């Protein structure tokens, strides 16, 4: 029997949600969930974490939400805590092709 390769990524779902918001600050929760490959409820929970820790601010605009990322917050893991979220998103959220 052939072994099925394990599915894994280098980034957490929290990072994926941040990338979605960085690319489109008005992205709907269902679209974030679909892009990340998680349930809408999981996306809401992740966004609540990011808001509670000050990484994201939510503003109501009519019937929609708009999100603002705080680029000056440090990354959370001990190995990267000297780096800022903004530095990570400069690389990951930029849709421009690599030179």
Image: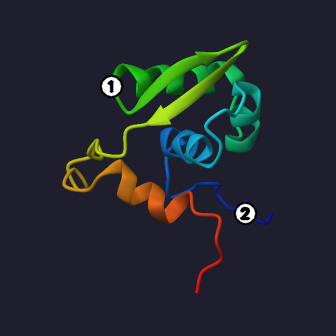
Q: Which type of secondary structure does the marked residue at label 1 adopt?
A: loop
Q: Quadrant of the C terminus?
A: bottom right
Residue at 38% in and 33% down: 55
Q: Position of residue 41 (x, y in %)?
A: 65, 18
Q: Secondary structure at mark 2?
A: loop
Q: Quadrant of residue 87?
A: bottom left
Mark 1 = which residue? Answer: 53
Q: Position of residue 98 (x, y in %)?
A: 60, 81
Residue 23 position within the rendered picture, expressed as x and y whole percent measured from the top left: 62, 49
| Front disc: 1 or 2 | 1
Please name the residue that numbered disc 2 is placed on.
3
Q: Is residue 37 left or right of residue 15?
A: right
**Residue 40 vs residue 9, the one in the foreground:** 40
Which residue is depicted at the point 71% across and 40% down? 37
Q: Does 38 appear above or below 98?
A: above
**Image point 64% across, 71% down: which residue?**
96
- Distance (Cα) linking label 1 and label 2: 40 Å
Does 76 sit left or right of 40 as displayed?
left
- Snapshot quadrant of residue 4: bottom right
Residue name at image x 50 percent, y 58 percent: 10
Farthest-out residue, right: 1
């Amino acid at each position: 029997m052939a072994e099925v390769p394990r599915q894994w990524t280098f980034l957490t779902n929290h990072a994926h949600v941040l990338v979605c918001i960085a690319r489109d600050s008005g992205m709907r929760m269902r679209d974030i969930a679909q892009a990340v490959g998680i349930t809408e409820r999981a996306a809401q929970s992740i966004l609540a974490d990011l808001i509670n820790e000050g990484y994201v601010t939510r503003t109501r605009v009519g019937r929609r939400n708009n999100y603002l990322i705080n680029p000056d917050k440090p990354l959370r893991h001990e190995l990267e805590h000297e780096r800022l979220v903004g530095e990570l998103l400069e690389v990951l959220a930029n849709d421009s092709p690599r030179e």
